[in-house]
Amino acid sequence: MYKSEQLTLVRESARDFAERFIRPHIMEWDEAQIFPIELMHQLGEHGFLGVLVPEEYGGAGLGYQEYVSVIDEIAQVCGSIGLSVAAHNSLCTNHILQFGSEEQKQKYLPKLATGQAIGAWALTEANTGSDSARMMCVARREGDEYVLNGSKCWITHGKSGDVVVVMTRTGEIGAKNNSTAFIVERSNVGLKYGKKENKLGMRASETAEVILEDCRVPISARLGEEGDGFKQAMKILDGGRISIAALSLGIAKGAMSAAAKYAQERQQFGQPIANFQGISFKLAEMATKVHAAELMTREAAALKMEGTSMTKEAAMAKFYASEICVEVSTDAVQIFGGYGYTKDFPVEKFYRDSKLCTIGEGTSEIQKIVIAREVLKEY
Protein backbone atom coordinates (compact mmCIF):
# COMPACT_ATOMS: atom_id res chain seq x y z
CA MET A 1 0.00 0.00 0.00
CA TYR A 2 2.87 2.39 0.67
CA LYS A 3 5.88 0.71 -0.88
CA SER A 4 6.10 1.55 -4.56
CA GLU A 5 8.86 2.88 -6.77
CA GLN A 6 7.17 6.29 -6.98
CA LEU A 7 6.73 6.53 -3.21
CA THR A 8 10.39 5.59 -2.75
CA LEU A 9 11.46 8.38 -5.11
CA VAL A 10 9.21 10.89 -3.35
CA ARG A 11 10.58 9.82 0.05
CA GLU A 12 14.17 10.13 -1.12
CA SER A 13 13.53 13.53 -2.65
CA ALA A 14 11.89 14.88 0.53
CA ARG A 15 14.59 13.32 2.73
CA ASP A 16 17.37 14.84 0.65
CA PHE A 17 15.73 18.27 0.73
CA ALA A 18 15.28 18.11 4.50
CA GLU A 19 18.90 17.09 5.09
CA ARG A 20 20.32 19.76 2.78
CA PHE A 21 18.13 22.76 3.46
CA ILE A 22 16.45 22.21 6.84
CA ARG A 23 18.67 20.26 9.23
CA PRO A 24 21.54 22.82 9.31
CA HIS A 25 19.19 25.54 10.57
CA ILE A 26 16.82 23.72 12.93
CA MET A 27 17.88 25.20 16.26
CA GLU A 28 18.64 28.63 14.81
CA TRP A 29 15.08 28.92 13.53
CA ASP A 30 13.59 27.33 16.66
CA GLU A 31 15.30 29.51 19.23
CA ALA A 32 14.79 32.77 17.33
CA GLN A 33 11.27 31.76 16.22
CA ILE A 34 12.18 32.49 12.61
CA PHE A 35 9.65 31.49 9.99
CA PRO A 36 11.94 30.80 7.01
CA ILE A 37 9.98 32.32 4.13
CA GLU A 38 12.82 31.75 1.67
CA LEU A 39 12.74 28.04 2.54
CA MET A 40 9.02 27.99 1.73
CA HIS A 41 9.81 29.34 -1.71
CA GLN A 42 12.43 26.59 -2.13
CA LEU A 43 9.92 23.97 -1.02
CA GLY A 44 7.59 25.25 -3.71
CA GLU A 45 10.29 25.10 -6.36
CA HIS A 46 10.88 21.45 -5.47
CA GLY A 47 7.17 20.61 -5.73
CA PHE A 48 6.46 20.13 -2.03
CA LEU A 49 3.84 22.90 -1.73
CA GLY A 50 1.58 21.62 -4.47
CA VAL A 51 1.76 17.89 -3.89
CA LEU A 52 -1.97 17.33 -4.43
CA VAL A 53 -2.45 20.04 -7.07
CA PRO A 54 -2.89 18.76 -10.66
CA GLU A 55 -0.09 19.54 -13.10
CA GLU A 56 -2.41 21.76 -15.13
CA TYR A 57 -2.37 24.21 -12.21
CA GLY A 58 1.38 23.99 -11.66
CA GLY A 59 1.33 21.26 -9.02
CA ALA A 60 3.04 17.90 -8.70
CA GLY A 61 -0.20 16.03 -9.44
CA LEU A 62 0.46 13.36 -6.82
CA GLY A 63 -1.85 11.62 -4.34
CA TYR A 64 -2.30 11.32 -0.60
CA GLN A 65 0.18 8.46 -0.19
CA GLU A 66 2.93 10.64 -1.67
CA TYR A 67 1.72 13.57 0.40
CA VAL A 68 1.92 11.53 3.62
CA SER A 69 5.48 10.53 2.67
CA VAL A 70 6.54 14.15 2.11
CA ILE A 71 5.18 15.34 5.48
CA ASP A 72 6.60 12.25 7.23
CA GLU A 73 10.13 12.75 5.89
CA ILE A 74 10.26 16.49 6.56
CA ALA A 75 8.85 16.09 10.09
CA GLN A 76 11.52 13.50 10.91
CA VAL A 77 13.96 16.39 10.62
CA CYS A 78 11.83 19.35 11.78
CA GLY A 79 8.23 19.32 12.97
CA SER A 80 7.87 23.07 12.45
CA ILE A 81 8.58 22.91 8.74
CA GLY A 82 6.45 19.79 8.45
CA LEU A 83 3.57 21.69 10.02
CA SER A 84 3.92 24.64 7.66
CA VAL A 85 4.06 22.36 4.62
CA ALA A 86 0.97 20.51 5.87
CA ALA A 87 -1.05 23.66 6.56
CA HIS A 88 -0.17 25.18 3.19
CA ASN A 89 -1.02 22.04 1.23
CA SER A 90 -4.04 20.55 2.96
CA LEU A 91 -5.84 23.62 4.23
CA CYS A 92 -5.49 26.75 2.12
CA THR A 93 -4.40 25.22 -1.19
CA ASN A 94 -6.66 22.19 -0.93
CA HIS A 95 -9.71 24.31 -0.04
CA ILE A 96 -9.30 26.29 -3.26
CA LEU A 97 -8.58 23.10 -5.21
CA GLN A 98 -11.69 21.33 -3.90
CA PHE A 99 -14.20 24.16 -3.79
CA GLY A 100 -12.85 27.00 -5.89
CA SER A 101 -14.26 28.06 -9.24
CA GLU A 102 -12.18 27.47 -12.34
CA GLU A 103 -11.26 31.16 -12.32
CA GLN A 104 -10.13 30.95 -8.68
CA LYS A 105 -8.08 27.82 -9.37
CA GLN A 106 -6.37 29.41 -12.35
CA LYS A 107 -5.61 32.55 -10.37
CA TYR A 108 -4.31 31.12 -7.10
CA LEU A 109 -3.20 27.49 -7.43
CA PRO A 110 -0.17 28.05 -9.69
CA LYS A 111 1.28 30.57 -7.22
CA LEU A 112 0.51 28.43 -4.17
CA ALA A 113 1.77 25.20 -5.74
CA THR A 114 5.10 26.71 -6.74
CA GLY A 115 5.74 28.63 -3.54
CA GLN A 116 5.36 32.07 -5.10
CA ALA A 117 2.57 32.58 -2.55
CA ILE A 118 2.26 31.23 0.98
CA GLY A 119 -1.17 30.01 2.04
CA ALA A 120 -3.10 30.38 5.31
CA TRP A 121 -6.47 29.02 6.45
CA ALA A 122 -8.41 30.96 9.07
CA LEU A 123 -11.17 29.18 11.00
CA THR A 124 -10.43 29.30 14.74
CA GLU A 125 -11.49 32.21 16.94
CA ALA A 126 -10.74 32.95 20.58
CA ASN A 127 -14.11 31.72 21.82
CA THR A 128 -15.13 29.39 19.00
CA GLY A 129 -12.55 26.71 18.41
CA SER A 130 -14.70 23.73 17.47
CA ASP A 131 -17.97 25.65 17.87
CA SER A 132 -17.80 27.24 14.43
CA ALA A 133 -21.55 27.93 14.24
CA ARG A 134 -20.98 30.74 16.74
CA MET A 135 -18.16 32.54 14.96
CA MET A 136 -18.00 36.27 15.56
CA CYS A 137 -16.14 36.99 12.33
CA VAL A 138 -18.92 38.07 9.99
CA ALA A 139 -19.33 38.81 6.29
CA ARG A 140 -22.02 41.27 5.21
CA ARG A 141 -23.15 41.58 1.60
CA GLU A 142 -23.04 45.09 0.14
CA GLY A 143 -23.91 45.15 -3.52
CA ASP A 144 -21.21 43.33 -5.48
CA GLU A 145 -18.97 43.03 -2.45
CA TYR A 146 -18.78 41.44 0.98
CA VAL A 147 -17.45 43.31 4.00
CA LEU A 148 -15.58 41.11 6.48
CA ASN A 149 -15.06 42.04 10.13
CA GLY A 150 -13.63 40.03 13.01
CA SER A 151 -10.49 38.24 14.09
CA LYS A 152 -9.02 34.75 13.96
CA CYS A 153 -6.42 33.20 16.22
CA TRP A 154 -3.87 30.36 16.08
CA ILE A 155 -3.55 30.80 12.32
CA THR A 156 -0.54 29.15 10.71
CA HIS A 157 1.08 31.81 8.48
CA GLY A 158 -1.38 34.36 9.85
CA LYS A 159 1.21 37.13 9.42
CA SER A 160 3.09 36.01 6.32
CA GLY A 161 0.38 34.24 4.32
CA ASP A 162 -0.14 35.85 0.89
CA VAL A 163 -3.44 34.06 0.27
CA VAL A 164 -5.79 33.51 3.22
CA VAL A 165 -8.94 31.40 3.10
CA VAL A 166 -11.18 32.92 5.77
CA MET A 167 -14.25 31.28 7.30
CA THR A 168 -16.96 33.77 8.23
CA ARG A 169 -20.50 33.75 9.59
CA THR A 170 -23.11 34.92 7.11
CA GLY A 171 -26.18 33.82 9.08
CA GLU A 172 -27.53 34.03 12.60
CA ILE A 173 -25.50 32.62 15.49
CA GLY A 174 -26.13 28.90 15.84
CA ALA A 175 -28.20 28.69 12.66
CA LYS A 176 -27.71 25.91 10.14
CA ASN A 177 -25.57 26.70 7.06
CA ASN A 178 -24.48 30.03 8.50
CA SER A 179 -20.86 29.93 7.37
CA THR A 180 -19.17 31.09 4.15
CA ALA A 181 -15.54 30.94 3.03
CA PHE A 182 -13.68 33.71 1.20
CA ILE A 183 -10.26 34.13 -0.38
CA VAL A 184 -8.50 37.24 0.91
CA GLU A 185 -5.22 38.49 -0.50
CA ARG A 186 -2.50 40.01 1.70
CA SER A 187 -2.62 43.19 -0.41
CA ASN A 188 -6.16 43.88 0.85
CA VAL A 189 -5.98 46.92 3.14
CA GLY A 190 -8.63 45.38 5.41
CA LEU A 191 -6.48 42.32 6.16
CA LYS A 192 -4.12 42.79 9.09
CA TYR A 193 -2.28 40.62 11.54
CA GLY A 194 -2.05 40.82 15.30
CA LYS A 195 -0.14 38.92 17.96
CA LYS A 196 2.38 36.32 16.87
CA GLU A 197 2.26 33.48 19.40
CA ASN A 198 5.28 32.60 21.54
CA LYS A 199 4.95 28.81 21.54
CA LEU A 200 6.34 25.83 23.44
CA GLY A 201 7.18 23.98 20.23
CA MET A 202 6.79 24.28 16.45
CA ARG A 203 8.49 27.63 16.92
CA ALA A 204 9.69 28.01 13.32
CA SER A 205 6.13 27.62 12.03
CA GLU A 206 4.47 31.01 12.29
CA THR A 207 1.24 31.17 14.29
CA ALA A 208 -0.47 34.54 14.45
CA GLU A 209 -3.74 36.40 14.82
CA VAL A 210 -5.59 37.47 11.65
CA ILE A 211 -7.62 40.68 11.86
CA LEU A 212 -10.27 41.79 9.38
CA GLU A 213 -11.33 45.44 9.56
CA ASP A 214 -13.92 46.47 6.97
CA CYS A 215 -12.17 44.07 4.66
CA ARG A 216 -13.90 44.36 1.29
CA VAL A 217 -13.78 41.48 -1.16
CA PRO A 218 -15.69 40.98 -4.43
CA ILE A 219 -18.32 38.26 -4.78
CA SER A 220 -15.77 36.43 -6.94
CA ALA A 221 -13.69 35.87 -3.78
CA ARG A 222 -16.43 33.68 -2.28
CA LEU A 223 -15.73 29.95 -2.29
CA GLY A 224 -18.89 28.16 -3.39
CA GLU A 225 -22.30 29.43 -2.41
CA GLU A 226 -23.20 31.48 0.63
CA GLY A 227 -23.78 29.08 3.53
CA ASP A 228 -21.52 26.32 2.19
CA GLY A 229 -18.60 27.16 4.47
CA PHE A 230 -19.16 24.67 7.29
CA LYS A 231 -19.65 21.71 4.93
CA GLN A 232 -16.51 22.70 3.07
CA ALA A 233 -14.51 23.07 6.27
CA MET A 234 -15.51 19.63 7.54
CA LYS A 235 -14.32 18.00 4.31
CA ILE A 236 -11.07 19.96 4.41
CA LEU A 237 -10.49 18.93 8.02
CA ASP A 238 -10.92 15.27 7.12
CA GLY A 239 -7.93 15.62 4.81
CA GLY A 240 -6.18 17.88 7.31
CA ARG A 241 -6.34 15.15 9.94
CA ILE A 242 -4.38 12.88 7.63
CA SER A 243 -1.79 15.68 7.42
CA ILE A 244 -1.45 15.92 11.18
CA ALA A 245 -1.30 12.14 11.47
CA ALA A 246 1.59 12.18 8.97
CA LEU A 247 3.22 15.04 10.87
CA SER A 248 2.88 13.10 14.14
CA LEU A 249 4.28 10.01 12.46
CA GLY A 250 7.35 11.87 11.24
CA ILE A 251 8.08 13.44 14.62
CA ALA A 252 7.71 10.06 16.34
CA LYS A 253 10.02 8.42 13.81
CA GLY A 254 12.61 11.17 14.26
CA ALA A 255 12.54 10.79 18.04
CA MET A 256 12.70 7.00 17.87
CA SER A 257 15.59 7.03 15.41
CA ALA A 258 17.61 9.38 17.59
CA ALA A 259 16.89 7.27 20.69
CA ALA A 260 17.80 3.96 18.99
CA LYS A 261 21.12 5.34 17.73
CA TYR A 262 21.97 6.86 21.10
CA ALA A 263 21.09 3.64 22.96
CA GLN A 264 23.69 1.79 20.90
CA GLU A 265 26.36 4.43 21.46
CA ARG A 266 25.84 5.21 25.15
CA GLN A 267 27.86 2.89 27.40
CA GLN A 268 27.02 1.97 30.98
CA PHE A 269 28.52 -0.86 33.02
CA GLY A 270 30.77 -1.74 30.09
CA GLN A 271 28.07 -2.17 27.45
CA PRO A 272 25.61 -0.19 25.32
CA ILE A 273 22.44 0.73 27.20
CA ALA A 274 20.47 -0.86 24.32
CA ASN A 275 21.47 -4.20 25.87
CA PHE A 276 19.44 -3.48 28.98
CA GLN A 277 15.87 -4.73 28.97
CA GLY A 278 14.50 -1.45 30.34
CA ILE A 279 15.78 0.35 27.25
CA SER A 280 15.20 -2.36 24.64
CA PHE A 281 11.60 -2.83 25.75
CA LYS A 282 10.99 0.92 25.42
CA LEU A 283 12.34 0.81 21.88
CA ALA A 284 10.16 -2.22 21.07
CA GLU A 285 7.05 -0.39 22.28
CA MET A 286 8.02 2.78 20.40
CA ALA A 287 8.52 0.87 17.14
CA THR A 288 5.19 -0.94 17.51
CA LYS A 289 3.29 2.30 18.13
CA VAL A 290 4.95 3.99 15.15
CA HIS A 291 4.15 1.05 12.89
CA ALA A 292 0.50 1.03 13.95
CA ALA A 293 0.23 4.78 13.44
CA GLU A 294 1.66 4.48 9.93
CA LEU A 295 -0.79 1.73 8.97
CA MET A 296 -3.74 3.80 10.19
CA THR A 297 -2.50 6.91 8.40
CA ARG A 298 -1.90 5.03 5.16
CA GLU A 299 -5.35 3.45 5.29
CA ALA A 300 -7.01 6.85 5.73
CA ALA A 301 -4.94 8.17 2.81
CA ALA A 302 -5.98 5.22 0.64
CA LEU A 303 -9.67 5.81 1.40
CA LYS A 304 -9.24 9.50 0.63
CA MET A 305 -7.78 8.65 -2.78
CA GLU A 306 -10.62 6.22 -3.49
CA GLY A 307 -13.14 8.93 -2.75
CA THR A 308 -14.61 6.74 -0.01
CA SER A 309 -15.95 8.25 3.20
CA MET A 310 -13.04 8.34 5.67
CA THR A 311 -14.16 10.68 8.44
CA LYS A 312 -13.79 7.96 11.07
CA GLU A 313 -10.51 6.60 9.76
CA ALA A 314 -8.94 10.07 9.43
CA ALA A 315 -9.99 10.96 12.98
CA MET A 316 -8.65 7.65 14.28
CA ALA A 317 -5.33 8.14 12.50
CA LYS A 318 -4.98 11.70 13.78
CA PHE A 319 -6.00 10.74 17.32
CA TYR A 320 -3.74 7.71 17.60
CA ALA A 321 -0.73 9.09 15.75
CA SER A 322 -0.71 12.34 17.72
CA GLU A 323 -1.01 10.59 21.08
CA ILE A 324 1.76 8.08 20.35
CA CYS A 325 3.88 10.92 19.01
CA VAL A 326 3.87 12.44 22.50
CA GLU A 327 4.50 9.03 24.11
CA VAL A 328 7.39 8.13 21.80
CA SER A 329 9.00 11.57 22.16
CA THR A 330 8.70 11.34 25.95
CA ASP A 331 10.33 7.90 25.99
CA ALA A 332 13.09 9.18 23.69
CA VAL A 333 13.96 11.91 26.19
CA GLN A 334 13.99 9.28 28.95
CA ILE A 335 16.42 7.08 27.01
CA PHE A 336 18.77 10.03 26.59
CA GLY A 337 18.55 10.73 30.32
CA GLY A 338 19.98 14.08 31.35
CA TYR A 339 21.27 14.74 27.85
CA GLY A 340 17.71 14.47 26.55
CA TYR A 341 16.82 17.52 28.62
CA THR A 342 19.39 19.70 26.86
CA LYS A 343 19.30 21.45 23.51
CA ASP A 344 22.53 19.73 22.47
CA PHE A 345 20.53 16.68 21.40
CA PRO A 346 17.48 16.52 19.09
CA VAL A 347 14.94 14.76 21.29
CA GLU A 348 14.04 17.76 23.44
CA LYS A 349 12.77 19.52 20.31
CA PHE A 350 10.80 16.46 19.16
CA TYR A 351 9.32 16.39 22.69
CA ARG A 352 8.28 20.05 22.54
CA ASP A 353 6.94 19.82 18.99
CA SER A 354 4.94 16.67 19.64
CA LYS A 355 2.30 18.19 21.92
CA LEU A 356 0.82 20.46 19.28
CA CYS A 357 -0.20 17.39 17.29
CA THR A 358 -2.77 16.44 19.96
CA ILE A 359 -4.28 19.95 19.79
CA GLY A 360 -4.11 21.34 16.24
CA GLU A 361 -6.90 20.65 13.69
CA GLY A 362 -9.13 19.23 16.41
CA THR A 363 -8.00 18.10 19.85
CA SER A 364 -7.81 14.44 20.80
CA GLU A 365 -11.09 14.93 22.63
CA ILE A 366 -12.77 16.25 19.48
CA GLN A 367 -11.40 13.28 17.52
CA LYS A 368 -13.04 10.93 20.05
CA ILE A 369 -16.36 12.70 19.55
CA VAL A 370 -16.04 12.33 15.77
CA ILE A 371 -15.02 8.67 16.03
CA ALA A 372 -17.82 7.80 18.46
CA ARG A 373 -20.41 9.54 16.30
CA GLU A 374 -19.28 7.57 13.24
CA VAL A 375 -19.15 4.28 15.15
CA LEU A 376 -22.69 4.73 16.45
CA LYS A 377 -23.94 5.19 12.88
CA GLU A 378 -22.76 1.66 12.12
CA TYR A 379 -24.90 -0.06 14.73
Image (cartoon, grey):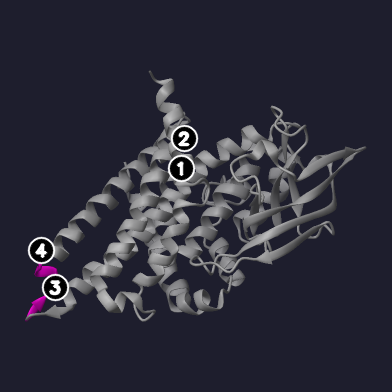
The residue under the point 31% across, 74% down is: 340
The residue under the point 69% across, 27% down is: 176
What residue is pinned by disc 3?
A: 273
Residue 365 is tagged as 1
Decide if residue 304 is in sight here: no
Spatial distance from mark 4 to mark 1, Cα to Cα? 34 Å
Q: From the viewer's perspective, is 106 left or right of 269?
A: right
Q: From the viewer's perspective, is 367 left or right of 216?
A: left
The residue under the point 39% across, 20% down is: 378
Query: Considering only order in the chain, which callout, 1 or 4, is on the residue closer to the N terminus?
Result: 4
In the displayed orientation, state which residue is furthest to the top.
Answer: 379
Disc 4 secondary structure class: helix
What residue is pinned by disc 4?
A: 277
Discs 4, 1 touching: Cβ within 8 Å: no
Q: Is residue 171 above or below residue 317?
A: above
The nearer-to-camera label among 2 and 3 is 2
At label 4, the amino acid type is: Gln
At label 1, the amino acid type is: Glu
What residue is pinned by disc 2?
A: 369
Discs 1, 2 touching: Cβ within 8 Å: yes
Q: Magenta segment range?
A: 270-276
- Residue 165 is situated, as x and y percent measured from the top left of the image, at 69, 48
The picture quadrant where one finds residue 237 is top right
